[in-house]
Amino acid sequence: MLVVMQSHATEDQVRAVCRRIESLGLKAHPIPGAGRTAIGITGNQGAIDLGVLESMPGVIECIPVSKPYKLVSRDTKEEDTVLRIPTPSGEVLIGGQHIGLVAGPCAVESEEQCFAIAERLKATGVRLFRGGAYKPRTSPYSFQGLGEPGLKILAKVREKFGFGIITEAIDNESLDLVEKYADVIQIGARNMQNFSLLKRAGRAKKPVLLKRGMSATLDEFLMAAEYILSEGNYNVMLCERGVRTFSDFSRNTLDLAVVPAVKKRSHLPILVDPSHGTGKRHKVLPLSRAAVAVGADGLLVEVHHEPEKALSDGMQSILPEEFAELAGEMRQIAGVLHRIVN
Amino acid sequence: MLVVMQSHATEDQVRAVCRRIESLGLKAHPIPGAGRTAIGITGNQGAIDLGVLESMPGVIECIPVSKPYKLVSRDTKEEDTVLRIPTPSGEVLIGGQHIGLVAGPCAVESEEQCFAIAERLKATGVRLFRGGAYKPRTSPYSFQGLGEPGLKILAKVREKFGFGIITEAIDNESLDLVEKYADVIQIGARNMQNFSLLKRAGRAKKPVLLKRGMSATLDEFLMAAEYILSEGNYNVMLCERGVRTFSDFSRNTLDLAVVPAVKKRSHLPILVDPSHGTGKRHKVLPLSRAAVAVGADGLLVEVHHEPEKALSDGMQSILPEEFAELAGEMRQIAGVLHRIVN
Amino acid sequence: MLVVMQSHATEDQVRAVCRRIESLGLKAHPIPGAGRTAIGITGNQGAIDLGVLESMPGVIECIPVSKPYKLVSRDTKEEDTVLRIPTPSGEVLIGGQHIGLVAGPCAVESEEQCFAIAERLKATGVRLFRGGAYKPRTSPYSFQGLGEPGLKILAKVREKFGFGIITEAIDNESLDLVEKYADVIQIGARNMQNFSLLKRAGRAKKPVLLKRGMSATLDEFLMAAEYILSEGNYNVMLCERGVRTFSDFSRNTLDLAVVPAVKKRSHLPILVDPSHGTGKRHKVLPLSRAAVAVGADGLLVEVHHEPEKALSDGMQSILPEEFAELAGEMRQIAGVLHRIVN
Amino acid sequence: MLVVMQSHATEDQVRAVCRRIESLGLKAHPIPGAGRTAIGITGNQGAIDLGVLESMPGVIECIPVSKPYKLVSRDTKEEDTVLRIPTPSGEVLIGGQHIGLVAGPCAVESEEQCFAIAERLKATGVRLFRGGAYKPRTSPYSFQGLGEPGLKILAKVREKFGFGIITEAIDNESLDLVEKYADVIQIGARNMQNFSLLKRAGRAKKPVLLKRGMSATLDEFLMAAEYILSEGNYNVMLCERGVRTFSDFSRNTLDLAVVPAVKKRSHLPILVDPSHGTGKRHKVLPLSRAAVAVGADGLLVEVHHEPEKALSDGMQSILPEEFAELAGEMRQIAGVLHRIVN
């Protein structure tokens, strides 16, 4: 933390701030400048809310300096984390050199629907299947997902087609069930700061895919992951899915620069969801290309064989044959970057 | 829903869209214009995702027309809802002519702290006391609240000082306890779209204060309230607490225009939280004035007798004597608007 | 500027950064912390782009500390600036204790229109008249203003009704004319960083009203004013008119917290434009109340006697009789705050 | 325009709105729905501000339907516009299949600097050189560019190295000079709605590169281009350079989804500036890859041979040898998309 004093702050005011800092068990380092004095603070500031210094006479601002995350930081672990997702057909690697593709419908609607999509996806070489049994919907009157019967359908998809399964949990109760039936537990954007759920996910035995909240800063995103790691689950992958901005031509603004930014600060893998990130079918392919090109460790793509009949998000789902084309292109772009698509 | 066709869309394309609409059991109303044709859709569109029409040939855009909320809408109930919060010293009214003030610390830290603040607040005439026993914190290493022992302290504050108690629930488990100990159940900004929690709050027997999410649109905010009403709990008040924007001089951007906007669309009362809304002590008083002036039905203000020792948010807490001054000014401004401060 | 080193930065890396800083003629102050070292920089950094330090090995971030504005800062001039706008009926004061109201149509459409509005406004006690002769419009096909003939109409309004005139200049050519015909030169939001125009305004002999850009940070806003002062024109007032956010229920999000924030940092007066700030007629009155309550030094309100026939922005114009009511309420709220409405 | 009535609007209110619409010379199309009535409007609405209908009794909202741009629209010209930039070494094509690379320093500092950079860039195969002689800077105390002497240096770079020259104009006076010395006139983000400058650019005889404003919607961006085309200059290319959002880890949020969005609506080429778009050197290469992958028609990259000595934006400049690597990768990614890098 750095405390910046007003240019006309008196020496007494500077001393008073230093004394207050030291009374908190910390060390104050006044830096007299040409125009004004700043005071650096060192020592363990974890539990103390230093913002109050801002209301002391002569203080203009408090600027946080050290980053609050620990376990997710590259300072703690320098090499990339590579997740190993077990599937009936062997492990799928995500992170480091490895790019993982995940495809499937927005919502699990029926066994027929999932089998139809899974069968078509199987041919594309993708090995992870997504589909929501619990759907967070803006309206209470929209389709809310099939619940446990949906999870059972996903388990059958695993068994019959050999896919690893990724699906969302929305509260502690559904997390218990998702942990039982699926291979990866997804925490959605709206729950990124549902800290109760994050702690529960941190005690789960399965890997977690954590989506960025709609208006989460990078620090908040990494701190949400820190909640999961701090409970003992180190198998976490992040996912950018678009943030909310003034921009009105797409559902969200896909913030691809977050990918190199995460990689600079953290060892965790980060995927991109171009379907939610754009909300429009014709943007899924170009943004998928861009996501792999920018360095993402994977893609989460909504695929439906009959998007016009989808119970949710049909507008942003692509066809299985479009996904096959996409997967081929991803392999080519990954090749340019000396990476491997799983 | 209105489907806008491209200016060079063919008659066949227009007809195909109309057929698709009617195959969904709806009625299509083509409106041929000078430049292009638009197609209005009528009928019950609740369960159908019409966005898929956007990918039909010749279609440029689908524009939603009807608002999705029902029970919270002024269309359903024209007169203002007035909430009656029971307290040991009689009901406090919020809504209509009545402005409700709520004050107290960010977090319940100890019985001594709560009693010290409650005693000082008592003298100001405020009748609702706030304080968090469950604190959603960005960092897992920050103070997370006292939990049930904190709720018991709040219950003692009610008993000893006669306040009504408002406190936050963060998951289904804590909601059970908050419902037991408090008078109003608060759902925080980070949980505004925790639909599982909203449904549980909808089955509670106590009034709910629902804070706007950090990047919630007005429709999403009202739909979150709709979740609560749709489960049978009609005692809901909304609360604006600042939204996230590019603006960097305050923690959030307090969006006061949402107050008249809510009042135009909904019968529910709406409060303002100038403490979280600005994150800075010296802005709490001016923004409180502005909130009452713009027509808010109440204020939620963080007050601490020793803000520099607060375990959270000390930076935005004001002193009890500053709150007394604030309460006096609020009464004067309310008077200009012919309203009553409770 | 503060340079934050990585936690595993070597001593050599810290030394290299210090040497680079000193090679630039500045002084480096290393602050060794528990987790990492930070390096404070003092000396005159005006002309040097220190961001490059961020790419040196071991550096994680560069954090700017000192504020870049000088002449607009309270550090330079502690007391509030009070502008004195000359009008045929005496000076109007804006700033300090004094709140100035400005009213009139969005665009000057004709002498009849301006006279009709001016006559009705005269009765309300308002003494400053606004109206655009040059209109920045999103579309090249929209009404662009009458130009110099519009300015001549405004000059007649001054002469006939005794108003002071505020009107917008959009380039150097129009600024020459506005300076000739009007009493206050307005620089619009879209030109807030048209630095060529700001410099020209800085050489003008008349006061300048500078509107905040649609996505201007507070520092950028104050720096834009600094451009004007740095050329010698100290008669500047600022104006908040809403910023662009994700929020979609009003044209812009009026950021009222900027008022106390400006007052903390600068001695310049700041007005609020609730008409552009909301874009909706029914929000003008509540947001006007809020603006005066939050401490604004004035209001800029669009008034039209026949809003449904206005050539621009009719949607956000109120009627003269609504303005009379507004002016009365403003006087009452100002009274609560011990201020005077001019 | 579509006028949406309240659900309890009376038939008289609907009729009154229809009459008002027809009194304006337009045609009203009432669409009675299950819940409420909407009224479509057809006819030439160009000059009329229909927003005022929103304040009529019973009206809840007015929703614009038709897009306001004409000349820039794909409705007007279906095939991609391909710009031909003349250089001493032959034309460079931008648009359609052709991707154009542009490189050079942020600011022209001296002949030595420009020659040093140009010589190194020559070897990479890039054929368009950028460099600012007029620099819009947030602070009046920052380096503002060399002005005409800077343009003369750029003209020498053209002559000596055979590059086409792109440089920014900031007002009508500088545009006259840029038109004389350079091959492409750049309009910067801060001037995207400097309509006076756009009109002047529309009368220029050279191609124009128009950067997106920091908070410009897609419609505003295209309308700004429309200003240039409407004055007769059809040689316009757009450029995404990042928008302003809450996200704080990079200077701006590069909105790559705007590329397919522009291509859906307009025939104009669109480039991406990853240097301003991220503000950080280590993000330039990944975001350049992403920009080409998403379908951009070119890149504008800041290159400096001694970034740590740059007078502006050194922090986001890459080295000539890094650019050589980037150019090579761009050719490979373009190959995957069957496009050609010029």
Image (tube, coloured by chain):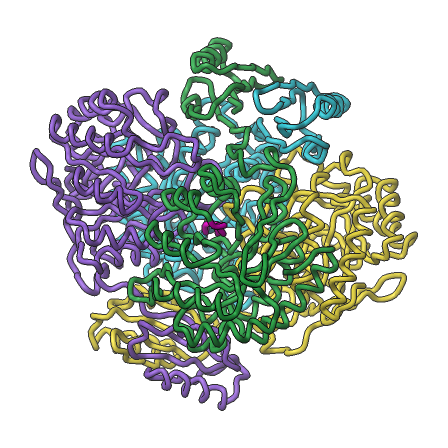
Chain colours: A yellow, B cyan, C purple, D green
Q: Which residues are magenta?
A: D206-214
Residue D230 is covered by the magenta coloring: no
In the rendered view, does A295 fall on the left or right side of C118? right
C166 is higher (above) or lower (below) than D316? above
Q: Quadrant of the C terminus of chain D?
A: bottom right
In the rendered view, does D96 fall on the left or right side of B249? right
D336 is higher (above) or lower (below) than A317? below
- The x, y position of residue D309, in whole percent, is 42, 77
Query: What number of labels is visible?
Result: 0
- Who's the residue at 61% across and 17% down the image? D33
Is residue C285 visible in this depiction of the protein? yes
In the rendered view, does A220 fall on the left or right side of C241? right
- The x, y position of residue D129, in whole percent, is 51, 64
Looking at the image, which is closer to me, C273 or A53?
C273
- The x, y position of residue D89, in whole percent, is 57, 63
**Residue at the farthest right position:** A160
In the rendered view, does D203 fall on the left or right side of B52? left
- The x, y position of residue D112, in whole percent, is 42, 77
Is residue A72 visible in this depiction of the protein? no
Looking at the image, which is closer to me, B143 or C128?
C128
